[in-house]
Image (tube, grey):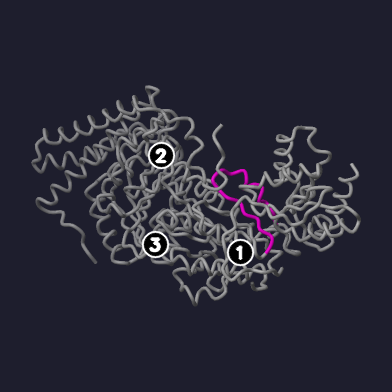
Amino acid sequence: MSTGPSLNGGDNRARLIALYGTMCRIRAFEETALAAHKAGEIPGPLHVSIGQEGVAAGVCTNLRRDDRITSNHRGHGHALAKGAGVSGMMEELFGRAGGHCRGKGGSMHIADFSVGMLGANGVVAGGIPIAVGAAQGLKLLGRDSIVACFFGDGAINRGPFLEGLNWAVLYRLPVLFVCEDNGVAAFTATASVTAGPGVVARSEALGVPCLSVDGNDAAAVDEAASRLVAEIRAGAGPRLLHATTYRITGHTSTDPAAWRDPAAVAAAKEAEPIGRLRARLLAEGVPPSFLAGIEGEARAEMSQAREAALSAPWPDPAIAWEDVQDSGAVEAH
Amino acid sequence: MAQVTLVEAARLAALQEMRRDPTVWVLGEDVARGGLFGQYRGFLDEFGESRIVSTPISESMIMGGGLGAALVGTRPIIEMRIFDFVMCAMDELVNQVAKVRYMFGGQAKPAVVVRMPHGIWRNSAAQHSQTLESWFTHIPGVVVAVPATPADTAGLLVSAIRSDDPVLFFDPKNLFPVTGEVPEVIDPIPFGRARHARQGRDLTIVTWSALVPQVEEAGAMLAQRGIEADILDLRTLWPWDEEAVAASLGRTGRLLVAHEAVTVGGFGGEIVARMVERLGPGGMKAVARVGQPRVPVPFAPPLEDALKPDVAKVVAAAEALVRR
């Protein structure tokens, strides 16, 4: 088994700084989007992953451009970490013509096939069969790419979770299942609606080896993902990464999640992944100004993307009729 | 031209396309054993287990996995075994397969064929005999194919496999033993073109799928009674051949739609509505529909017979229509 990249010395420092940069960009993107949503610039529902950035960053740093991912309704971070273009993402949230999906998908359906991002999904567990099938297709075509499949702890109570893991084992498919366990399924504590000990036990029962990791420790996520990805690339079949994390914000941008214990929320904010990695890097002697520079660049990038999206053209209503189907497409009128 | 059964025609079409294109493959329950109806007989020996994949009874994965495999550039034939089981894969079909191309602004190419042997299957009762093709015409993003003859099944399946659109292919399972001629090289039959099954001047009968042979038999009986029916087998319901129906109706002035599905909410209602929109409320002399009553398909033979559209019901409806 490959042990993955070394996490010692200068290479390690650069890798941690890259992780830090990815997380800062995700955070800045989502904070900017939240502000834009509050200002009425972004229509529709918006699910942000503030506090969960360590999982997206730590997993995707182990993926190649020709690897694929599927995501869920809380997918901005996965898309950004996989390399999706920011302007296309921001314009998509704004419903503008230059969005990755031409303004037809919005936040919940972000996709950027050019970087292997096969789509966020508005249905919990909806991405699991697609990810597994993509891996089967890649195998049939003789490619050596793998597929990472992001889903939340709420998804493990849906049938496609069982079907997908079973299937991936049967056909020994190159899939990394990533369960981002933030402990809450929409507004309900997952533990209160889940029998048994949870995702790892279910996964192991189906023969999918797992690693559990503190998802708020991006370096630990990176290290675990790197081990699992190496095994998958070596042809060992599917693996599952269980990453515990915390959704600092509500289910949607308009949900204050006021039912939560304020002490728990405060504790979670102390443990959030960007602050954690910042503290580590500072302790290792990285100058605060250097990290501030990364943070500032991320905020500036996203702020510019917001400005650009706000002045970007709306889609021509005529394109509402396009991209439906070739045979039997209806004509615009 | 070879004389073959309808199910053999379908087998030959899939065989031809899998030989032509190595990205075409099949997934579904028992397909490596030849499929429930023998529609994939011999495929395992020729194509191996990576291209004829017998799967667990996991409809969500069968449908969603086929979609995922299409998104990376393969052309899966998704075999649902019996139509009624697609209900276990409705999220994957309706929310995913039918939507990805549009939701992602044209980035996705969900080039799948979903084969669903449907229709009343003698004494198989309510969960193995449904005829719900009308539902799927209501979902943007998909083609709905409902062939009734060996040649049409073969030609439409070739089109379906080559199409970049998701094609919902309703194999008429009760007609699998019906024989007909199929050419050595099976050419694609375009979607949206009706087959003009019989020429007549007295009324237009529009039909598809399992009811086609019975409507044709009814046409012959009506002719003996001096009524000449113009019979159109639509072959696909989306797109459907509105022009052919309108042209026929222009000649006959009388419209009978006959399908095996429940009449209420059936696609016959859409056909009638479109013709009224085109021709105006006074544009036809008479209109009627034949289909199942809004009752589940029962098990016992006399019960099934009581509800099932058949030759006698089509003849009676046609005779009543021309008298009006």
> What residue is at 85 percent from the left and 49 percent from the top?
B317
Which residue is tagged 1? B154
Which residue is tagged 3? A204
The reply to whether label 3 and label 2 mark residues of one chain is yes
Residue B143 counted in the magenta span: yes
Crowding near the residue tagged with mark 1, few <14, some 14–19, many ≥20 C-alpha atoms within 10 Å = many
In the rendered view, does B282 fall on the left or right side of B165?
Answer: right
Q: Which mark is residue A245?
A: none
Quadrant (top left, top right, bottom left, bottom right) of the C terminus of chain A: top right
Task: Find residue A11 and report its horizontal and vertical position in percent.
Answer: 12, 51
In the rendered structure, which amino acid carries the disc numbered 2?
A: Cys
Q: Earlier in the sequence, mark 3 or mark 2?
A: 2
Residue range highlighted in magenta: B130-149
Q: Which mark is residue A101?
A: 2
In the rendered structure, which amino acid carries the disc numbered 1?
A: Ala
Q: Are marks 3 and 2 in contact (CB under 8 Å)?
A: no
Q: Nearer the viewer, mark 1 or mark 2?
A: 1
Task: Find residue B274 and report its horizontal and vertical position in percent.
Answer: 70, 38
Crowding near the residue tagged with mark 3, few <14, some 14–19, many ≥20 C-alpha atoms within 10 Å = some
> What residue is at 29 percent from the left and 30 percent from the top?
A305
Up the image or down, A178 lies above or below B40; here it is above
Task: Find residue A314 and report its horizontal and vertical position in percent.
Answer: 41, 28
- Residue at the farthest top position: A39
In the rendered view, does A54 fall on the left or right side of B222?
Answer: left
The reply to whether label 3 and label 1 mark residues of one chain is no
Using the image, name the chain to which the residue with label 3 belongs: A
